[in-house]
Image (tube, rainbow, N blue to C red):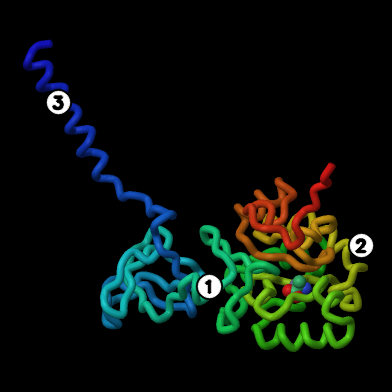
Amino acid sequence: MKRKQIFIMTLAVIATVTSTTTYIPAVDASTSSYRQAKTSLHLRQGASLEQPSLTVIPTGIYVTELSKVGTWSKVQYGTKIGYASTKYLLTDEQIGGKRIGHTLIANKNLALRATYAPGENQQARAAFEKMRVAAKKEGITLVAFSTYRSYAYQKTLFDKYVARDGYEKASTYSAEPGKSEHQTGLAFDIGGADSTKYATFSFSKTKEAKWLFANAHRYGFHLRYPSGKESWTGYTYESWHYRYVGATLAARLKVSGLTMEEYFHLAPWKPVKVSTP
Ligand code: DAL
Ligand code: ZN
């Protein structure tokens, strides 16, 4: 090979290498730090209250913390990078449960901290409203009769059920405080036109329950405690309990027919019995 040819090839290699450095590297999920907005807060251009707001980060949304500057965190929120006050950004440790990507899991094995109190999730509420309006056009009435429940409120509920039915029985239909998905603000108990059927087995036979089963995933809602999956979820069938996971994950869960425990390879509530010879 002639020297001139080698020189041109070398230039080509350098050009290729340098051109790749112009890409903004994707945030590496394995090393980045997720933080959840404790309240709605401004994403600012710089690390000071005087800096202009780029956008508002809603409560319960996950951002990626890139670095810290004093009491401020440099964060990525979607495609935007800016600064947010660190004290309003919760760590996984402060939340409890288990986070997989931007999805927070709470179940019988994964308890939330008593202090985690995000309120009703605004994205989940907006998705529910969209679904409610769409259903109404088809003659279906949907009512969210129980959404966010604080740790303290869940404790009063669970204690009441234990007093009535005993611990064993109560645990099949009610979560111990810290273990309720309602504490995430993402769970919506949905009923229809007949309020006497709220949170009862009879709801599963209604046209509203059937509509939800067929359509809820299109609005980002997942049937969290299906029939036949009791050993995974730890709860009896709840045709009314829907968990907001966003439309992408909801569609994947719907197609798979899996619970969140199965889909994310989490431990089942009861280990599946394997027969021994
Ligand atoms: N009924 C569901 C399991 C709860 O109490 O969160
Ligand atoms: Zn529920």
User: What residue do we see at 46% from left, 72% from top?
Assistant: 91
The kind of residue tagged 3 is: Thr
Residue 112 in the figure: left or right of residue 216: left
Nearer the observer, 33 or 255: 33
Query: In this rendering, does residue 224 appear at all?
Result: no
Q: Which mark is residue 60?
A: 1
Q: Earlier in the sequence, mark 1 or mark 3?
A: 3
Relative vertical location of residue 214 with respect to residue 171 in this rendering, above or below:
above
Of discs 3 and 2, which sits in the foreground?
Answer: 3
Dot 1 surroundings within 10 Å: few (below 14), some, or many (20 or more)?
many
The kind of residue tagged 1 is: Gly
Cα distance, mark 1 to mark 2?
Answer: 34 Å
Quadrant of the rendering where the N terminus is positioned: top left
Taking the view exactly as shown, the residue that stands out farthest to the left is 3
Cα distance, mark 3 to mark 2?
Answer: 71 Å
Q: What residue did someone put label 3 on?
A: 10
User: What residue do we see at 80% from left, 48% from top?
Assistant: 274
User: What residue do we see at 17% from left, 32% from top?
Assistant: 14
Coordinates of residue 3 in the picture (x, y in percent): 7, 15
Query: In this rendering, does residue 17 appear at all?
Result: yes
Q: At numbered mark 3, what does the secondary structure look like: helix, strand or loop?
A: helix
Q: Earlier in the sequence, mark 3 or mark 2?
A: 3
Q: Which mark is residue 205?
A: 2
Residue 101 in the figure: left or right of residue 270: left
Are circles 1 and 3 on residues that touch, CB within 8 Å?
no
Coordinates of residue 218 in the picture (x, y in percent): 68, 55
Q: Earlier in the sequence, mark 1 or mark 2?
A: 1
Coordinates of residue 56 in the picture (x, y in percent): 43, 73
